[in-house]
Structures are given as structure tokens and as C-alpha cells.
Image: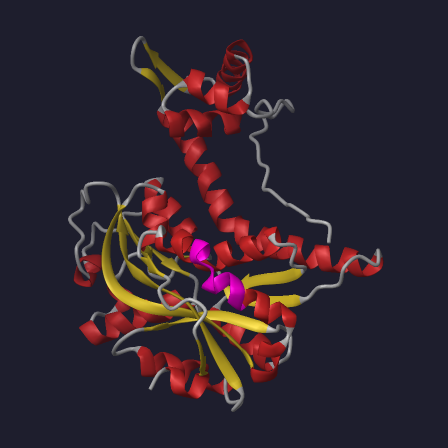
Amino acid sequence: MQRISIKPVWTIQHPDGRQLPARLLELLVRVHAQGSLLAACQSLGMSYRHAWDLVRQGEAQCGTALLNMERGKGSTLTALGEKLVWADHRISARLGPVLDSLASELEGEIGRLTEQEPVKLRLQASHGYAMDALVKSLAADGMALERRYGSSIEAAAALRDGACDAAGFHIPIGSLQSQALALYARWLGDDDLMLIDVASRRQGLIVAPGNPKKIYELSDLTRREVRFINRQAASGTRFLLEGLLAQAGIDEGRIQGFEQGEFTHAAVAAYVASGMADVGFGLEASARQFRLDFTPLAHERYFLLCHRDALEQPALQAVLRTLRDPAYGQAVNALPGYDARHAGRVLPFNQAFA
């Protein structure tokens, strides 16, 4: 099957029609990551002279500097340069899973029209790092698959409606487990459902490096000076947080920003890293991705669900082989807060949470 890739592209346009130079944003992102204009040029295969031309053109359009250069200290971004870089991170984090889902749908549609290899596996899942690793591994092995990312409820409903072969979502480990299972019960009433373990993972508070606002527990979210960024309504992570707040007797209405939601863990972390919020709630892996601090508050179990007869199909057998491959386990265990020791274990769903 032909692979389709969709990447977000954005720019800033002057009233006279001039736009920021192509690749300037990409260059600034690399400078921010590597701390040097020269290193950024080398990683992009770009000449130093061309890079400076891009920077000067961008500065002329913006009317202010984008880079600070100090002899012997490399390159640092100005406040505007940093703002542009974090805007790029936020755009990619927010839109990445949506565009991946759309690309996968288009692959299937084009494949059917051009008589290419048909889709062998339809996945609908709550987006996460272990799931992303699984999808990439299956695609690298030549699996023709269609994946759609959305909330856990959407994944459960898709499995019930026959819109996917396997659904991926997560359930808290501990006191909120039965409450979460009750939430999904209306879509998971079939007796032949089978659970395939993928990983366990940690969720908690994501804060700026050094935790300058001293946010250590849920009660700190209610302080007037604390700005919070949430996940979107109906997401499994939002449900987890609401359950933790209820257990602690904390009124979510007292949390500034509680109704402001992002659609991915990475987008929450990027929002905090850009300084637009003081704290978010999400995965440890997303916090570490943006070099943020993290306080764990809950563990949860991420898994796939499918019908019993689907397990015998070649596509699901390939999924099991990948999950049980030591290389996959090592890759997932390397993700902060993830544990793949039970990856590939299969249990009847009605027995998996006994």
C-alpha cells in the first residue's frame, strides 16, 4: 500500500503579501533544540550563509531580532524566536494524530481505487506513545492498516459498531477502575470480547522545569495564580482527572482553565512548555518529551480489545507477534512512565479486571 504523509505547514504573512521565508521555522526549531546555528545548519544540510539569509529576511519582516549570537556561547532565540518555535511544537502536537488518521483513511481509499493491497487491519484507538510505536512497527513490516485516533469512548463505540477490528483505550489501575469500566459498559456488552495487553503507564501533573509555582498535588490547582490546561471532554484522561478530583473532594469549577482542553498529551505538554499554562495533566512521557517536570498521580492499563474470532485472523496474529517481540518491549520500556512487561498477553475481557 502507498504511504501518505500529511504535515502541518504554517507561516506569517505581512499585509503586503510577504511571508516568512520557507524553512525559517524549521531552522529556528533546530537552533532551539541544538543551541547552535551551525549545528542546526549541519542537521538540515543547509549552508551557514543561506541560514543567515533566512534569519535576516525573517527579522526584516517581523521588525525585531529572532536570534542572539554570543561568541563562544552558540545561539539563543529571542522572545519572538521562542514564541515561533513553541507555536510550531503546539501545532504539530495538536494536529499530528488527526493528520495521521486522515492520511491512513486516504491510503485505504486510494488503495481500493487503484487495486493495491487491501487494508488488513482497522485500528481505532486513544492516541498514546506505545500505540504509536505499535503502528509504526506494523507499518514497517508491511502491514496494510488503517488507524484512527480519537477518545476511548469513540474507540469502544467503533468496536461495538463493527467500524474497526481492534480498539485501543485505557482503564485506571486502582480505585477508579470499576467506575471506568462502568463508563464503557454500554459499548462492551459482548461476551466474546478479548483483551490484549499493551502497556501500563503513568499520568500526573506536568509543570515547568524546576516547578516554579510549587504545584505538587491536585489541591494546588485551585490556587488563583495557577493556570491549568486540561484534555478534551470525553477523553479517558479527562475522566481519570475528574475521578481523582472527586475522590479528593475538589470542586473542578475552582480550577482556572479546567474547561480548556487539548486533544493529545503532547499538546498539553507543549502548552505548558510554551508558558501558556502553569500545569497540565497527562502522561509522563509527554512531559519528558518537552523537558518538563512531572508528579505521578495515577497508573493505568492500556490495551486493545477485539472479538474472539478476530484473534485468529493473520492481522491480529501479526499484532501479537509485534507486542511479544523483545525489541518492541525495549522500545516501550524506554518511554518514561511506561511498562510493557505484559505486552501481548491475551485474556477474556470479562476476566481481565477480576
How many marks the image carries: the answer is 0
* Residue 222: image location, x then y, percent: 21, 60
* Residue 118: image location, x then y, percent: 75, 63
Is 153 one of the magenta-colored residues? no
* Residue 200: image location, x then y, percent: 35, 65
Q: Is residue 52 visible?
A: yes
Q: Nearer the viewer, residue 117 or 123?
A: 117
Instruction: Decide if residue 253 is on the left or right side of residue 115.
Output: left
The magenta segment = 320-328
Quick check: 206 above or below 155?
above
Q: Nearer the viewer, residue 5 or 322?
A: 322
The residue under the point 80% across, 61% down is 112
Instruction: Decide if residue 25 is on the left or right side of residue 200.
Output: right
* Residue 131: image location, x then y, percent: 48, 60
Our reading of the magenta stretch's main secondary structure is helix
List the single residue furthest toward the right.
114
The residue under the point 21% across, 70% down is 250
Q: Is residue 80 visible?
A: no
Residue 7's image quarter?
Answer: top right
Q: Quadrant of the N terminus?
A: bottom right
Is 322 one of the magenta-colored residues? yes
The residue under the point 35% across, 83% down is 353
